[in-house]
């Protein structure tokens, strides 16, 4: 498979971190940013492979932090190239995944057709501002490298808490502003967030507690883990203003 970037340079899909660096250096920054935000077509397929390579360590670290109480349902928001999906299906009673990219959703439904047919997984086009699930559905909600594309941290955190069961856990993995700023992504596509930005939004959404975890091998990454209240004080419906917000790309970096 070959594809062409904005500069009309063709190359094959990346297979290693070295390949990834070579590919990204030859791609226009805005083109990269657009495809990270919303993978589409052949370029989106290649970007999904890039995301899987780039996200491997933070995904592995995040999965190790899941607090799974069997049987339990798990939601991944912005699964992109689908790196974590097989592990999450194995860990959960049922896995739901949402992504803004219809191409990524089609790929997931095709690759995990048996799990979908068996009723153990479902993948839908949706975004974090308006999750298509009932309240108090999931024991864990996981999202990696998506918050750069959220219009409102507060609205998305409220919606994540709404779909979490009492005592459930949200895990948000991302590269904080001080590190992501070095990548010089277009400001009109990437919204950079500090750890304080994220923890404040989670607390304002009503989460009982938050904590920060960082992988030793890749300290530029951060996980924010937030626990929902145990007493069942969960929201029964999404806030009206979040449901009415414009659609926002949700795919991870």
Image: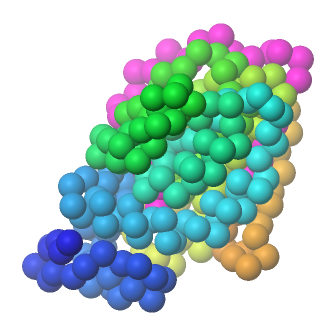
Residue at the image position 77 percent from the left and 67 percent from the top = 214
User: Residue placed farthest to the left in the image?
Assistant: 8
Q: Quadrant of the N terminus?
A: bottom left
Relative image position of residue 197 (x, y in whole percent): 66, 50
Q: Is residue 73 left or right of residue 80?
A: right
Q: Relative to residue 134, is residue 53 depicted above or below? A: below
Relative image position of residue 61 (x, y in whole percent): 72, 62
Residue at the image position 68 percent from the left and 62 percent from the top = 60
Q: Is residue 155 visible?
A: no
The quarter of the displayed image where residue 105 is located = top left
Residue at the image position 42 percent from the left and 75 percent from the top = 184
The quarter of the displayed image where residue 27 is located = bottom left
User: Residue placed farthest to the top in the image?
Assistant: 236
Residue at the image position 79 percent from the left and 53 percent from the top = 65
Relative image position of residue 195 (x, y in whole percent): 70, 57
Reply yes or no: does residue 229 show up in magenta.
yes
Q: Is residue 89 visible?
A: yes
Q: Nearer the viewer, residue 110 or 23?
A: 110
Q: Relative to residue 15, is residue 165 depicted above or below? A: above
| Magenta-highlighted residues | 224-253
Magenta span main SS: loop
């Amino acid at each position: 498979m070959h594809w062409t970037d904005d500069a009309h340079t063709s190359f094959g899909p990346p297979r290693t971190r070295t390949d990834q660096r070579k590919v990204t250096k030859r791609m226009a920054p805005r083109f990269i940013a657009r495809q990270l935000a919303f993978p589409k077509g052949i370029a989106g397929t290649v970007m999904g492979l890039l995301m899987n390579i780039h996200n491997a360590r933070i995904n592995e670290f995040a999965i190790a932090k899941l607090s799974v109480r069997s049987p339990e349902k798990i939601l991944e928001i912005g699964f992109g190239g689908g790196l974590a999906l097989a592990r999450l299906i194995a860990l959960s009673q049922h896995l739901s995944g949402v992504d803004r990219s219809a191409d990524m959703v089609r790929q997931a439904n095709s690759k995990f057709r048996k799990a979908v047919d068996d009723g153990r997984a479902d993948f839908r086009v949706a975004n974090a501002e308006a999750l298509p699930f009932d309240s108090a559905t999931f024991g864990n909600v996981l999202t990696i490298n998506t918050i750069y594309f959220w219009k409102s941290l507060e609205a998305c955190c409220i919606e994540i808490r709404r779909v979490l069961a009492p005592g459930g856990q949200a895990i948000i993995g991302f590269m904080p502003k001080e590190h992501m700023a070095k990548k010089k992504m277009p400001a009109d596509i990437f919204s950079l967030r500090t750890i304080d930005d994220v923890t404040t939004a989670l607390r304002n959404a009503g989460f009982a507690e938050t904590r920060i975890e960082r992988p030793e091998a890749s300290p530029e990454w951060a996980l924010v883990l937030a626990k929902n209240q145990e007493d069942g004080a969960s929201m029964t419906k999404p806030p009206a203003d979040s449901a009415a917000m414009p659609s926002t790309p949700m795919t991870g970096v």
